[in-house]
Amino acid sequence: MAEFGVDRGENGSQMEPLLIANGSPSRDRLQDLALELVAHSAHFRGSLPKQFEHSLADLVRSMNCYYSNLIEGHDTHPIEIERALKNDYSTDRQKRNLQLEAKAHIAVQQWIDQDGLTQSATRCDSLQEIHRRFCECLPEDLLWVEIPDSEVRLPLVPGELRQRDVRVGGHIAISPGAVPRFLQRFEDRYSGLGKTESLLAAAAAHHRLLWIHPFLDGNGRVARLMSYALLREVLDTGGVWSISRGLARSEGEYKRQLAACDLPRRNDLDGRGHLSEETLVSFTEFFLKTCIDQVKFMETLVAPEKLRHRILSWAQEEIRAARLAPQSAQILERILYQGELPRDEVAPMFGVTPRHARRYLEPLTEQGILTSENLRSPFRLTFPAKLAAHWMPGLFPAA
């Protein structure tokens, strides 16, 4: 198992089927789920006030990072992630390392959100670039991999395909020398697909990438970032929802389904590939239903009137506790209705001087509730992680 770079000549057909066959009896059911996802995602994005998209995408980025890392056993709350983004780190070395890990994850997703991926996320060079960008920002402590049942400790090289055999649970991955060959087949098979087929392929590709296990470590995060990028591209999500929360909340089922997809074809009724098509169908159904569930959850959470009520109720509590100026509620209400608030409109709202108006604004800007591009730009609303429990209950656990 320790031989470096060996190629045992595995044939790419060993990871077939890469797509659900057209003749599969489950095909119609899966296509219906894909179309349902398209409809829900489009409706949610269309119903979301445009002025909320940017701020919500920022919060979803932290949420996605939190849940993806949680699946790996690393619990860094979005409030701690938010602090890391402001270079406010824990004095505890382990917690600081996890904050830096989360910051690295967010940097990669932000790069994806800013159209940094110029080609499909299923391309080999795209996958290596995702891995490289994530790992090169990690602290030194997290760039070492301990090999189970041995005293071997190996460096994790950002973007480098593994040069060593690995075992993941009961699955022994292909030999390291075969990885480039299998990734090329992976890339070829998942290119040039239509919208519905791309959604079915997103689920299949998620497992097949983990089956190849191209990197020494970090494969789970790369797979989830790849899936995020694919869904963003196919559905034009705008980054306002993510599957990672759903996968983490059903972590046991997620990992059980992935392990089942490693199983070989059961009999003549189980597709025509080396691996089981039945289990790939089951995982695809789980994947699509999880996506639909998360879109519905986010749509309910940020329904404009409900969100407005929760934010203004919170503001009134803060005003009663003398943590906000009484005028804050009116400022927030104006922004919630019109999307942004030009600076020169604040003073006339209350018949005061601009200098006096700044006193009403300072508590809101200091708490990260209002922000602006520069000193002349209008104010817009943000969604601080520390207030998510009040404004968006259920998005992630309270700190």
Image (spheres, grey):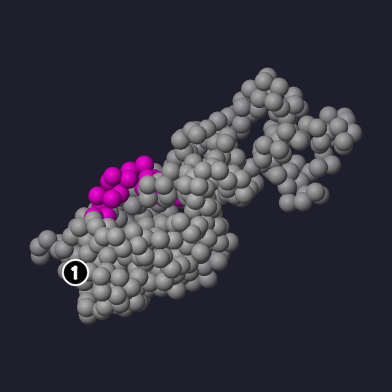
- In this rendered view, identify the residue nearer to me: 31 or 182: 182
Q: x, y (%) of residue 191?
A: 39, 72
The structure residue drawn at horizontal position 37% and vertical position 60%, both measured from the top left corner, is 145
Q: Residues within 10 Å of mark 1 (few under 14, many from 20)?
A: some
- 300 to 179, vertically: above or below: above
Task: Classify residue 182 by image quadrant.
Answer: bottom left
Residue 90 is left or right of residue 148, and the answer is right
- In this rendered view, identify the residue nearer to me: 47 or 319: 319
- In this rendered view, identify the residue nearer to me: 366 or 286: 366
- 126 to 85, vertically: above or below: below
Quick check: can you spot residue 182? Answer: no
Looking at the image, the residue that sits furthest to the left is 267
Residue 364 is left or right of residue 116, and the answer is right
- 147 to 178, vertically: above or below: above
The structure residue drawn at horizontal position 75% and vertical position 41%, both measured from the top left corner, is 341
Circle 1 — which element?
Answer: loop
Quick check: can you spot residue 218? Answer: yes
Amino acid on which the number 1 mark rests in the picture: Gly
Task: Classify residue 224 by image quadrant.
Answer: bottom left
- 228 to 86, vertically: above or below: below
Q: x, y (%) of residue 149?
A: 24, 57
The structure residue drawn at horizontal position 44% and vertical position 61%, both measured from the top left corner, is 143
Looking at the image, the residue that sits furthest to the front is 151
What quarter of the picture does the N terminus occupy?
bottom left
Residue 341 is left or right of residue 40, and the answer is right
Q: Which residue is mark 1?
A: 273
Dominant secondary structure of the residues highlighted in magenta in the image:
helix
Q: Which residues are magenta?
A: 242-259
Q: x, y (%) of residue 13?
A: 22, 74
Q: x, y (%) of residue 27?
A: 26, 59
The structure residue drawn at horizontal position 77% and vertical position 51%, both measured from the top left corner, is 374
Is 246 one of the magenta-colored residues? Answer: yes
